Image (cartoon, coloured by chain):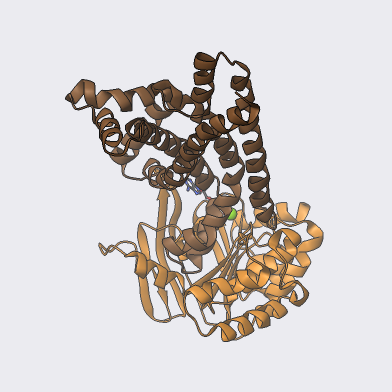
Chain colours: A brown, B orange
Amino acid sequence: MTFLQVTLFLWEGFKLSLLIFAVTLLCGAPLGLPIAFCSMSNFKPLKAVSKVFVWIIRGIPLMLQIFVIYYVPGLLFEYPVFAKIDRFFFLEYGISDTGRIVAVLLAFTINYACYFSEIYRGGIESISQGQYEAGYVLGLTKSQIFRKIILKQVIKRIVPPMSNEIITLIKDTALANCILVCEIIKQAKELAATQALVWPLFYTGLFYLIFVGILTIVLGKIEKKLDYFKS
Amino acid sequence: MAFLEIKNIKKSFGKYEVLKDISFSLEKGEVLSIIGSSGSGKTTLLRCINFLEFSEEGTISVDGNTIYDGGSLHKYTDAEIRENRLHFGMVFQSFNLFPQYTVLQNVTLAPTLLKRGTAEEIEANARRLIEKVGLSEKVDFYPCQLSGGQQQRVAIARALALNPQILCFDEPTSALDPELTGEVLKVIKGLKGKDSTMIIVTHEMDFAKNVSDKVIFMADGIIEEIGTPQEVFDNPKSEKTRSFLQKNDEI
Ligand SMILES: Nc1ncnc2c1ncn2[C@@H]1O[C@H](COP(=O)(O)OP(=O)(O)O)[C@@H](O)[C@H]1O
Ligand SMILES: [Mg+2]
């Protein structure tokens, strides 16, 4: 195989890595918000449920969570939903892996939503009570205070920890190969097995590096944009 | 009935009674200074008046209307509390400006959200108030670009923008370097007039003496002494007041 062929073959896998990255970010980031609010709720049972949930999700390896989501419907309810999706899409459209990818997307989204929720919670709780009180004495509603006063300060504070998490996310996508989803490392292992080529495995690192480089620049720009005020 | 009537306010945190039966009244245009050692309940009193805390007992009346009765069974809604708060303005010890907004935006935010006029009117009024506190050249600055004294003057303009009937200050100069207190006190003094009723918690005794119509000395959650500045400062009746003032003189 030529260098170009290997590159293209790996790129096919990296596209899947990027898909997992994008879906997790686009679904997990908003989903983290309601979880954060539940964790801060004054209603004790809701708060407890939310905290235990976050504890479990953050306390168990993501790889294990992928296994659980993929296998548990089959084992517990004798309804292997993801395998069925796999088969359906393969028979109807000749597309493989659909069910596995859905399982991975679910596991990633839930896992990252919990991590994001903790970042949000930390950010929201770090805003001084004085900011709320200044809003109250000006006769503003709680929702006005949150939207017009608190939110931007929270965003400024969570950009650095979110950046960290986002950079971790692209590298975590490699975990998808534990249920044989053809992300870039699985592709490279494929080459090692079928073509006896080992170097592509190391070459995958360059894909991650380039993408992380781009992320670093974009996230740095966002951080800079919020530099105009201190809080 | 006086313009502001505070009657029998009691406030506890858990078992600890911070305000024990506070009553006083204030006429329109009067300036009241509240002095007293740290921990005597001055901040808590202002917070009760601004509905940041809720007293378990006692009433608050403004201009003849009882707006709050802690002893009643009525459960105040968020909307009622907001309505009540608008009778008062509050300037905090730590300014609490909104860091992401410029000076002008800090002053226009609340009137805009409360729809207190057209955007032009609100901005014109804000600029007038910013000029009044002497910060015309700083309208487009962010709080982090201002000194503490300047920030506190913006906070005063922000409170004035809603035209409160009674403006409260909680140790407005305590967080400032000594050389910056003068500019803030001057602004507060400049607000004195027949229409501006003010309550000022302060440790600046000379200022309290000069600017007030009435002085309250608080100790351990009660009003130990109340009177004109001459009465309280020059002829204190209470032993506690005397020793407090003496200690202050020594410093
Ligand atoms: N939220 C609160 N919870 C419990 N105790 C409080 C609270 N706020 C104030 N206190 C207590 O009430 C007393 C009076 O406080 P404060 O009103 O701040 O006094 P001052 O402003 O005169 O220094 C203090 O002993 C303080 O510790
Ligand atoms: Mg105080």
Q: Is residue B195 visible?
A: no
Q: Is residue B117 left or right of residue B55?
A: right
Q: In the image, is residue B63 above or below residue B105? A: below
Q: Quadrant of ligand 2?
A: bottom right
Q: Is residue A111 left or right of residue B135?
A: left
Q: In the image, is residue B100 above or below residue A190? A: below
Instruction: Report the label total.
Output: 0
Q: If the image is split into quadrants, where does the N terminus of chain B sit?
A: bottom left
Q: Is residue B4 visible?
A: yes
Q: Residue at x 52, y 76 (%)?
A: B112
Q: Residue at x 29, y 36 (%)?
A: A89
Q: In the image, is residue A145 above or below residue A211? A: below
Residue A161 image offset from top left, x and y in percent: 58, 39
Residue A139 image offset from top left, x and y in percent: 46, 69
* Residue at the front extreme, as displayed: A1
Quarter of the rendering containing residue A78: top left
Q: Is residue A8 left or right of residue B8?
A: right
Residue A186 image offset from top left, x and y in percent: 49, 23
Q: Residue at x 40, y 74 (%)?
A: B61
Quarter of the rendering containing residue B178: bottom right
| A117 or B20, nearer to the observer | A117
* Residue at the right extreme, as displayed: B179
| B63 or B163, nearer to the observer | B163
Q: Residue at x 42, y 27 (%)?
A: A181
